[in-house]
């Protein structure tokens, strides 16, 4: 199967620092890929480079066969890619409703699509007229993902969606992501919670010092304690 997203030998510099040292990865359409690695390995930089927030110094970033590495971030978004940063990027002073309206940049929110999103995240329906800053951490993360879905997306880039969330909220996130997968939305996510990653991931790439040092199916990594310890410093099964 042809990859929907393909990175080849991607290098990224931030100021004087060389962060990505030739990243290679592929994600097939309709699948969920997970980026793992220690802090500072380059995971967030990879997402930001795909999105054009930091420009690749060299290498290729291709989405559905189209080269993205020289496009501006708004052009990349219009190509059908949504991005949820680690800080979520919501507008705390705006109501949930207003956050969603602002996210629908190409026109009014499609009512059927909005109903589907609110079915994914029922808490947003409950707090529709509440300022986003008053939401809980889990509700803010739901809003951040909902904003990325306000317009049709073929690919979502999501940075640590379960960071700081309670187990019950994480389970709700798993259910929501499975629904995205049923709707053929491709996802590349950075994640540290292995239960979440294992429940959803089809493929996994582990980064170390700005390059991919391990790639496999998620099932293969889950069964390979030696690879977990070698590349991540511990057996992931120890903290599921």
Image (cartoon, grey):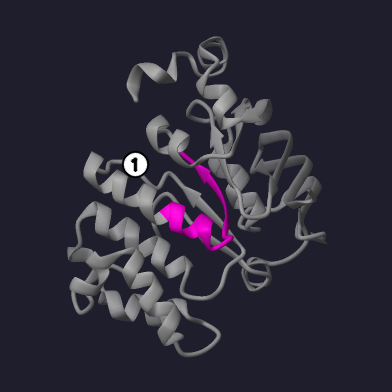
**Is any part of residue 232 visible from this angle?**
yes
Magenta-drawn stretch contains 183: yes
Q: Residue at x 28, y 41 (%)?
A: 164
Q: Quadrant of residue 18?
A: top right
At a point 30% along the width and 45% down the height, the residue shown is: 171
Residue 28 position, x and y percent, is 69, 49
| For residue 177, side relative to residue 70 (left or right) | left
In the rendered image, the vertical position of residue 171 relative to residue 127, given as above or below? above
- In this rendering, position of residue 19 left or right of residue 192: right
Q: Is residue 75 left or right of residue 168?
A: right
- Percent across and percent down for residue 232 are 51, 19
* Secondary structure at numbered mark 1: loop
Indicate the quadrant where residue 218 lies.
Answer: top right
Total marks shown come to 1
Residue neighbourhood size for the residue with mark 1, other residues' Cα within 10 Å, grouped as few (<14), some (14–19), many (≥20):
some
Q: Residue at x 20, y 62 (%)?
A: 135
163 relative to 23 in the view: left or right: left
Bounds of the magenta span? 177-191
Q: Residue tagged by mark 1?
A: 163
x, y percent for residue 133: 22, 65
Q: Nearer the viewer, residue 21 or 195?
A: 195
List x then y, in percent, for residue 236. 43, 20
Looking at the image, is 34 positioned above or below residue 38? below
């Amino acid at each position: 199967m042809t990859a929907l997203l393909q990175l080849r030998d991607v290098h990224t510099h931030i100021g004087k620092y060389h962060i990505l040292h030739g990243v290679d990865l592929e994600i097939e359409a309709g699948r969920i890929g997970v980026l793992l690695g220690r802090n500072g390995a380059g995971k967030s930089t990879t997402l930001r480079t795909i999105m054009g927030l930091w420009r690749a110094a060299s290498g290729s970033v291709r989405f559905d066969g189209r080269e993205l590495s020289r496009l501006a971030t708004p052009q990349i978004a219009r190509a059908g890619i949504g991005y949820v940063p680690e800080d979520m990027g919501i507008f705390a002073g705006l109501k949930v409703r207003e956050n969603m309206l602002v996210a629908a940049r190409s026109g009014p929110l499609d009512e059927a699509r909005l109903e589907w999103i609110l079915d994914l995240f029922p808490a947003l329906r409950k707090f529709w007229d509440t300022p986003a800053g008053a939401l809980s951490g889990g509700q803010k993360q739901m809003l951040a993902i909902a904003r990325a879905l306000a317009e049709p997306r073929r690919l979502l880039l999501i940075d640590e969606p379960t960071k700081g969330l309670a187990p019950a909220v994480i389970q709700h996130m798993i259910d929501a992501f499975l629904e995205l997968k049923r709707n053929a939305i491709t996802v590349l996510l950075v994640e540290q919670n292995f239960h979440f990653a294992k429940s959803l991931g089809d493929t996994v790439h582990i980064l170390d010092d700005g390059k991919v040092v391990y790639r496999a199916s998620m099932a293969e990594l889950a069964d390979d304690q030696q690879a977990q310890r070698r590349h991540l410093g511990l057996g992931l099964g120890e903290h599921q």
